Image: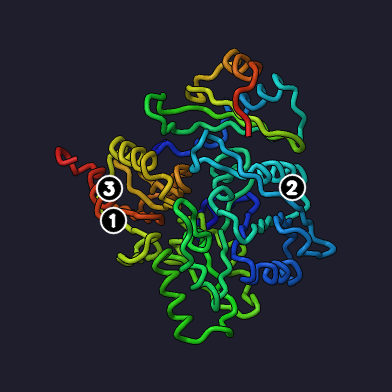
Amino acid sequence: MTTPATDEPRDERVPVTVLTGFLGSGKTTLLNRILTEQHGLRIAVIENEFGEVGVDDALVLDAEEEIFEMNNGCICCTVRGDLIRILGALMRRRETFDHILIETTGLADPAPVAQTFFMDDEIAAQLRLDAIVTLVDAAHILQHLDEVKPEGVENEAVEQIAFADRIVLNKTDLADEATLAEVTGRIRAINSGVQIIHAQHAHIYLPQVLDVGAFDLERVLADDPSFLTETEHQHDTTVTSVGIDLPGELDEDRLNRWLGTLLRTKGVDIFRSKGILALAGAPKRYVFQGVHMLLDGEFGRDWRDGEERRNRLVFIGRDLDREALERGFAGCLATAGAAA
Amino acid sequence: MPLGARPGPSPQLRELRQTVRRLLALDDDTAVVVRQLTCAEPGCPPLETIIAVLPMNGRARRWTLHTTTEQITEDDLRAALLAPPHEGA
């Protein structure tokens, strides 16, 4: 955890930014900007779209997207084999860069990329997923979102927005106010808590996307205390966010049973989950992040004297049943007793 | 550790990876992933361990051991890894 305001030890792991976005959204322009601006960082780039980036002194590695199933037929447990190999090799020359940036193809599914960081403890020990940044073309995203896909085929534009920690809403000069408002509404309906950065020609202030610690919930909440609770009820979208804010302490066994069943039966539809929990008997807050069925969690800072024990979590996914999620989670409270 | 989350790096996991490297005579460029996962298949034990070997050049391989990572012995690994492969990717 890297929260400069606290006594927590500094996180020395290398931050990794994942850059996604449809072809034409301005990804390459942003990447070139990141590589050429004077920010003092030595960035290693892993790119899946060949030959688009050419900067003399940057470490640029080509990779061919390789989806690797860790578990037979379970899409929740797919990782990117190419990344596991390349990140492992990069770690052996750790002293030559400060930051890693992974550029995905316009049609790439962000899940296996993110899951790679949740799967391998060696990678997680040395690298930390900093943020998933999705570039969106303000003038054309609506047609991509509305594109009807055949049964069983994902709409990649929806997925890339659902997985994002930061959306760079690019080319705002090419869309009118009404379109921008509609695009913003559609993005919020899918991923209510995501930070949206407006841009033209992918011109953004780079600290908005680099080393932002979006997977470090303690840090996110220190900057934005309402981060996990700003979800809206949306009934007209398939992919949406469900936020739960519940005071009280959780019974760990009940929580494990409920969450285990939920992820086993609905893991395919739950793209991302994140939360801060109050476990009964634990002096520290339990902080977790998940991608599909894979979870990463650890105890964060101590609960402060007089601080109300409450649980805040968000699920982003497809066909989420808000009522069932709220009911199931409430049943995990230590005080739920015989009702659980 | 609640929620069945990924356990942090442990001496035992490191040892398992080293044993995999030794048994299969892998070079340093080959990535080895050992991960305990919740099994979603009905009738299977709730936790299983996946071992994946990804050489820098060449085919990735994968084995599933239907037991927790903690319970795996060198004999288990030898029996699984040195048997003719059934799975791959």
Going by the numbered disc 3, the residue's amino acid type is: Phe
> In terms of depth relative to the viewer, which is nearer, A169 or A40?
A169
Tag 2 residue: A94
Q: Secondary structure at mark 3?
A: helix
Mark 1 residue type: Arg
Asked if marks 2 and 1 fall on the same chain, the answer is yes
Q: CA distance from mark 2 to mark 1?
A: 44 Å
Q: What x and y, as percent, mark residue A334?
A: 23, 42
**Alpha carbon separation for disc pair 2 and 3:** 42 Å
- Label 1 close to label 3 by CB (< 8 Å): no
* Tag nearer the camera, 2 or 3: 3
Position of residue A318 measured from the top left corner of the image (x, y, whole percent): 39, 55
- Check disc 2 and give the amino acid type: Arg
**Neighbour tally class for label 2: few under 14, some 14-19, many 20 plus, Cα within 10 Å:** some
Name the N-terminal-most of marks 1 and 3: 1
Q: How is the image coloured?
A: rainbow
Instruction: Give neighbour class at mark 1: few <14, some 14-19, many 20+ (Cα, 10 Å).
Output: some
* Residue A31 occupies quadrant: bottom right
What is the residue that sits farthest to the right in this orientation? A56
Q: Residue furthest left?
A: A338
Circle 1 or circle 3, nearest the eye: 1
Mark whose residue sits in front, 2 or 1? 1
Chain letter of disc 3 in the image: A
* Neighbourhood count class around disc 3 (C-alpha, 10 Å): few under 14, some 14–19, many 20 upward: many
Instruction: Please tell me which residue is depicted at 64% across the width and 22% down the height of the picture.
Output: B85
* Residue drawn at (41%, 50%) of the image: A270
A224 relative to A320, above or below: below
The residue that mark 1 highlights is A322
Of the pair A139 and A143, the residue shown nearer to us: A143
